[in-house]
Amino acid sequence: MKIAVTGANGFIGRHVLTELLKHEVEVIAVTRNSNRPSWMNKAIHNVEIDISRFSQDCFEKIGCPEVLIHLAWDGLPNYKSSYHLKTELPKQFSFLRAMIKSGLSSLLVTGTCFEYGMQSGSLSEEMQVKPNNPYGHAKNELRKQIETLKVDNPFSLAWARLFYMYGQGQADTSLYTKLKEAVMRGDQVFNMSGGEQIRDYLPVEEVARLIVKLAMLKRDLGIVNICSGKPISVHKLVEQWLAENNWNIELNLGHYPYPDYEPMEFWGDSSRLDSISVQEL
């Protein structure tokens, strides 16, 4: 099986490539630079393609993969920017449409829990989406636009709706990375919010494993929450990170306000993911 990965040089992408190497598949990393990154395994074929300026033969340039794992998305973590709708959405759809019309038979795209908007509690795939920021709107609109292509171009689609994650290589703006850097600097205090938010977190390695497994099924799965299904407060999660890594730092709770673009308590319903896992993963 030949599997291509866009956004291969990103946080999730690197872990997805590592996971793919555990399987007997040919791996193609789609990046903006033809120069192979020093971290990239030599078994991975690196192809330079900028999805903002792709050629019509991009499917052939990538090697006509059987499966595309599409992780690429610019403009984060500024979720409120109109860039997501005005620029990112049309370029994403144009690229994926070209791939599908050229013969791509199986596609996995990563969505976001922000598609659910300000809904609280356990969030399931059957719920009506109510995105309330441009990023969530753009992702949801991309999913709907891709689905319209099935009328003339049969292909399987898995929409992997991501919740929260943490791990090695995460952006400098993330909670996990900020905490780790503060500990490494020898800071005595770490400033954070009150930590009462209830969220759903997975290690990025587990997220990558689930993405790869779903993609390799090559089935028309529709929307699948990529989540733990286990709600946890941010405060408790941070305490867990401190204990697991033997880090010692005082937490200054309440220093930052809570985000206004997400509810205080929400987590993923993992029933659909668990059902697929039992049957086929």
Image (cartoon, rainbow, N blue to C red):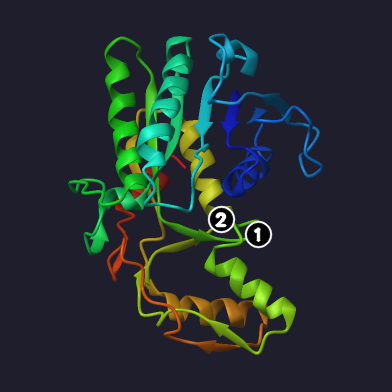
Residue 218 appears in view: no
In the image, 73 versus 161, the foreground residue is 73
What numbered label is drawn on residue 204? 2
User: Whole-percent x and y of residue 31?
Assistant: 65, 31
Q: Where, by quadrant of the figure, is residue 100 drawn? A: top left
What numbered label is drawn on residue 7? none
Vertical position of residue 210 compared to residue 181: above or below: above
Say whether residue 121 is left or right of residue 89.
left
Crowding around mark 2 (Cα neighbors within 10 Å: few <14, some 14 to 19, many 20+) is many
Q: Which residue is mark 1?
A: 168
Say whether residue 116 is left or right of residue 50.
left
In the image, 129 versus 202, the foreground residue is 129
Vertical position of residue 83 compared to residue 245: above or below: above
Q: Quadrant of the N terminus?
A: top right
Disc 2, SS: helix
Say whether residue 142 is left or right of residue 25.
left
Figure label count: 2
Residue appearing at x 49%, y 39% in the figure: 73
Disc 1, SS: loop
User: Whole-percent x and y of residue 80?
Assistant: 36, 52
Q: Where, by quadrant of the figure, is residue 245 drawn? A: bottom right
User: Whole-percent x and y of residue 64?
Assistant: 58, 14
Q: Amino acid at mark 2?
A: Val
Crowding around mark 1 (Cα neighbors within 10 Å: few <14, some 14 to 19, many 20+) is some
Residue appearing at x 56%, y 21% in the figure: 53
Which of the two discs, 2 and 1, labels the residue nearer the N terminus? Answer: 1
Residue appearing at x 41%, y 79% in the figure: 195
Residue 37 appears in view: yes
User: Whole-percent x and y of residue 124?
Assistant: 25, 52
